[in-house]
Image: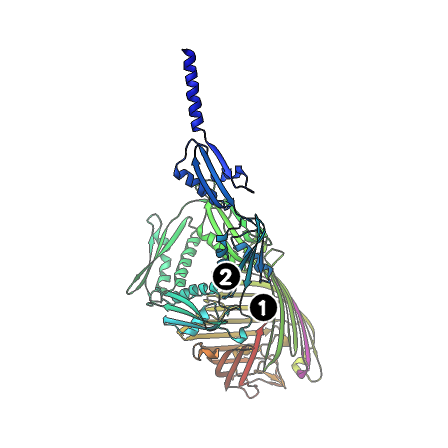
Amino acid sequence: MKKKIITTFLLIFFFFSHSYSTELKISGTKRIDIETIKVYGDIKIQPSYTNEELNQILKNLYETNFFEDVKVSFKNNILSIEVKEYPVINSIILEGEPTNKIKDALLEDISSKEKSSYIKSNISKDIIRIKKVYEILGFNTTDVDTKVEEINEDTVNLYFFINRGSKVKIKKIRFIGDKKIRDRRLRDVIVSEEDKFWKFISRNTILNKKNIELDKRLLTNYYKSAGFYDVNVISSSATLDDKNFSTLTYNISSGKRYRINKISTNVNPALDKKVFMPLEKNFKKLVSDYYSPFKVKKLLDSLDKLISFNDLQYIEHSVNEIVGDSGIEIVLNIYEGEKSLIERINILGNTVTNEDVVRGELLVDEGDPFNKLKFNQSIARIKSRNIFESVEEKVSTGSEKDLKVIDISVEEKPTGEISAGAGVGTDGGAVQFGIKENNWLGKGIRLETSIDISDDALKGGFDYSDPNYNFSGNTLSFGFQASDSDVAASGYENKVQSANISTSFEQYTNVYISPGIVLSADKLTVDSTASDQLKKQAGSFTELAVDYSITRDERDRTFMPTNGYSASFYQQLPIYADSSSISNNFATNFYRPLSEDIIGSIKFYVAAVNGIDEDVRVNKRLFIPSNRLRGFEKGKVGPKDGKDFVGGNYSTALNLEASLPNLLPESTNADISMFIDAGNVWGVDYNGTIDNQTQKIRSSTGIAANWYSPIGPVTFTLAKAITKNSSDTTQSFKFNLGTTF
């Protein structure tokens, strides 16, 4: 009986084990081994499979991109997997593109890769990607064909035949819709440019989708800065006029123009509200002005300065802009932020630049409290070095919740510059050449050398500048200059060599102080035709002096400003000199938009040089700069010794100007301005033969035009002297032509 029971048990065990054992059968493999299929397919041996489980295996294997076809089935305890492998791409050949750099970019961008599977469905996507690359480069009619060359059953070569076509240039840029601002002004805002034959160097005349997207952002920002809060660049379109030229059109809805009707603060009850009361004086200045995001930023900058001045930690802020029919209300929310410390700062992407250059601009360090204001200021300081293409920052949680890890990623850019130029006008001609390096040896040091050649002078110089010397936040500079002025008509030659060392630092916000030391040597050689003053000063002289300047700059921008002011004072004091003198000058410029089409400016300049027990040397005497007293020849105003204008101890000028950028039709490519200039040069240390009518204020009025000609920018000045001295030399018409190449 016992024997029968055992036998029966064995039979039952054998039956069930045989019935439920699963066999895996894989077929069709050539390159891919079975174990790889098991792993990528996530295949588990089990008694049975649902349809969902079989479909999941199928999906997993397709996602590998190894197989062109996959079949999965389960029958009679056999899991069958049948595959058909994709061929392998041996080589990808790009025909029709001559540039290796572009070829490398294309190979990087497409999904097809050498030594990977050849997937037919990827080819159409790759063609689209190739065309997009060429669109960015300005080729908008690119054709791409493909060919597959079978090497054997399992390997292919993939060919892309590229016909770039011609670059499509922008013939006309149009602005339509409720735009409210003249087309000429809008063209100055955007990057894209109309194709003109004098713009053959510019890449922005090529139809470029990347530039178009940038244009839309620039237009939006410009309108908002003018108070059009709801502006919408509805669309942009390009229509081909022919194969190589297009018309680019932007459809703009400007919306209503808003003014700021109220500014207030919302201070968290845990903070002292009185600390932020000084902001209210800034509020009063902006209320009733047109809204601008730059004005909001100015408010936030004032708030940041107040936070920094009071050394407030962990204070953050945000802005609410409430739009109503009467205007925009701005609310500054001030609150306590997250309290945390900086665990680590990582500098990434710098291959040439020393890490210390980046860290030297940081206002925060590892172990410090994480201060968002100081961190943002640090990033701005790094960007201002102008040695990086981009600077990106990332703040993440460190090893603990209250610790921060900061990643600062930089992308370096070429920092060397070569410049050359030429100019010619009624004053004569000049050529210039210069070499500049902004990141010497990866230390952020600036080196610059230049040479200028004119009709009667040769000038050259070398300058060295470390913007953050010894990580002090101060600039250290030194330089050497030399000049040789050989004025045969006046019978003299003047050679001057000088060396200087100086530093510069921001003492207060937008207030810069620059002290320095100057050593110079001056040699004056004369002949019998020279004036009495020149003969008196003939010989060699040396001077050691200290100088300094104080500058405040509140302009909206340094190039072609439209609002704000700048003011600077300079003084040079002798320490030791064969012929001692003290030099001073002060200059200030004010800019303000008087309307949409008029930019008004007032410029004032005054300079003085005073000898100490001796006459002021000829090379230190003052003249009015030619751009401050138009209608008179350069250096031909003021005291005169015989036939020579010898300059004076004092010089001053006042300029009133109204720029009219939209006066002339756009097709003229010209800007017009009207001006009134007034100035004088007076005062000498000796009498004798001096013709010195010092009481007469020289003045002039006229029109200036800037024309972007086919050969470069040209400035024309038509001026008429209103008041003058009989000995002055007037100049009713003047032009200057110059370009950079």
Q: Amino acid at mark 2?
A: Lys
The answer to which of 479 and 37 lies nearer the viewer is 37
- Quarter of the figure with residue 451: bottom right
Position of residue 543 measured from the top left corner of the image (x, y, whole percent):
65, 68
The answer to which of 661 and 553 lies nearer the viewer is 661
SS at mark 1 in the image: strand
Position of residue 602 measured from the top left corner of the image (x, y, whole percent):
46, 75
Quarter of the C terminus within the rendering:
bottom right
Residue 59's place in the image compared with 78, above or below, is below
Residue 54's place in the image compared with 127, above or below, is above
The answer to which of 733 and 352 lies nearer the viewer is 352
State how the image is colored. rainbow
Q: Which mark is residue 572?
A: 1
Query: Viewed as shown, does residue 1 lie left or right of 585?
Result: left
Quarter of the N terminus within the rendering:
top left
Residue 490 lies in magenta, yes or no? yes
| Residue reaching furthest to the top | 1
| Residue reaching furthest to the bottom | 726
Does the image show residue 697?
no
Helix, strand or loop: magenta stretch: strand
Nearer the viewer's eye, disc 2 or disc 1? 2
Q: Is the Cβ of the residue at disc 2 closer than 8 Å to that at disc 1?
A: no
Does the image show residue 191?
yes
Query: Viewed as shown, does residue 58 lie left or right of 733?
Result: left
Position of residue 545 measured from the top left corner of the image (x, y, whole percent):
62, 66
- Tag 2 residue: 131
Mark 2 and mark 1: Cα distance apart in space: 62 Å
Residue 435 lies in magenta, yes or no? no
The answer to which of 218 and 554 lies nearer the viewer is 218
The magenta segment is 486-502
